[in-house]
Amino acid sequence: MPTFTAPDGTRLAHHFVGEGEPLICLPGGPMRASAYLGDLGGLSKRRRLVLLDLRGTGDSDAPADPSTYRCDRQVDDVEALRVRLGLESVDLLAHSAAGDLALLYAAKYPRRVRTLTMVAARARALGVDFTTEHRLEAAALRADEPWFASAREAYGRVWDGTATDADFDAATPFFYGRWDAAAEAHAAGEVEQTNERAGDVYASAGAFDPVAARAVLAGWDARVLVLAGERDGGPLPRVAAAVAELLPHAELVVQEGAGHFPWVDDPDRFTETVASFLG
C-alpha cells in the first residue's frame, strides 16, 4: 500500500487499481474510505485508478488537528498526491461530496487539472446545494418499487434530521437505481468505511467561498464531465445541469436508470461514458 505525507505531516494512503494512464479518484461520503469505489464498474480496464483515502479514512492516518477534516483544508492533500505521482497535470474524478474538494482543488490549482469528472457530485464550492425538496422529488420516482411504502417515511426522517439507524437502513434503496443483490452488497460497507466525526467537519462553516471559486473557474479551460443519475436526488439532473453551466467547458450526461452510484447500477454504461470523455 503506497503512502505519502501531507503538508501537515499526516500519512495518507492511496491504492492503485488497473493499468493505463492514471485517474485520481476522490471518494465522497463525506469522508468515506475509497474502498467503496471498487474498480468503478470496470473503468480500471481503461485507466489506472488512483484511489485516495482521505485523512482519517481507510488506510490513511487521522490528523493531529481534527479541524483539517474541513474540505478546503484537504486541498493540499490532493496536491501532495499529484506531486507524489510525478504528474504535471491530472485527470481527476470526484464522487458525491468529493465534488466540493475537486472544485476547490481546481480553483486553487487550475493549471494542474487536465480533466474533471464529477459523478453524482456536490458543488457547494460554487454555491449550488441540494435541498430536501430535491431529494423527495427524486424519491417519488420510485413509488412503484415494492419497498417504497416502508422506506418513504424513513427517507423523510433522514433529511429532516430525526432518523434512527433503522431509518437510514430502510432508506438506503433510494440511493441506487435498482435495489438488487449488487446494490445491497455495495451498501453494506458504508458504516464501517465512514468517519462520521470527520464528515461532520467536512462542510463546516468557512469551508466554501463560492464567489471566489466562481471567479477563478469562470475562465478555466479544463474539460469537465458532469455525470448525474436519472433517479438521483443529489443532484437532480436539472441541478447537475445548473452546475455544468457554471463551468465553461463542461458537458452533462444523465445516466438512465441510475441513482447515486451509477457504476453499480449499470457498470458498462458508466464505464463507456467516462472512458469516452477521457479519451
Image: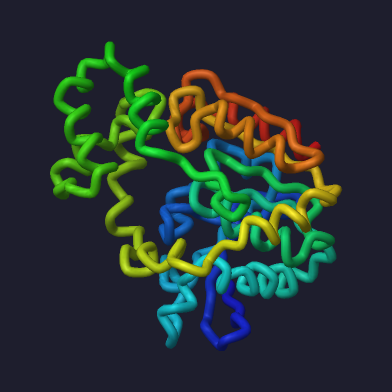
Quick check: 37 left or right of 144? right
Quick check: 8 left or right of 231? right
Which of the pair 167/40 is nearer the observer?
167
The answer to whether any part of residue 182 appears in the image is no
Which of the pair 133/277 is nearer the observer?
133
The answer to whether any part of residue 52 appears in the image is yes
Residue at 81% across / 52% down in the picture?
114
Residue at 56% across / 62% down in the picture?
208
Can you name the residue that lies furthest to the top here? Answer: 144
Image location of residue 101, percent across then percent down: 58, 59
Res 269 → quadrant: top right
Which of the pair 170/73 is nearer the observer?
73
Quick check: 167 left or right of 244? left
* Vertical position of residue 69 compared to residue 139: above or below: below
Which of the pair 100/183 is nearer the observer?
100
Image location of residue 155, percent across then percent down: 24, 35
Applied colour scheme: rainbow
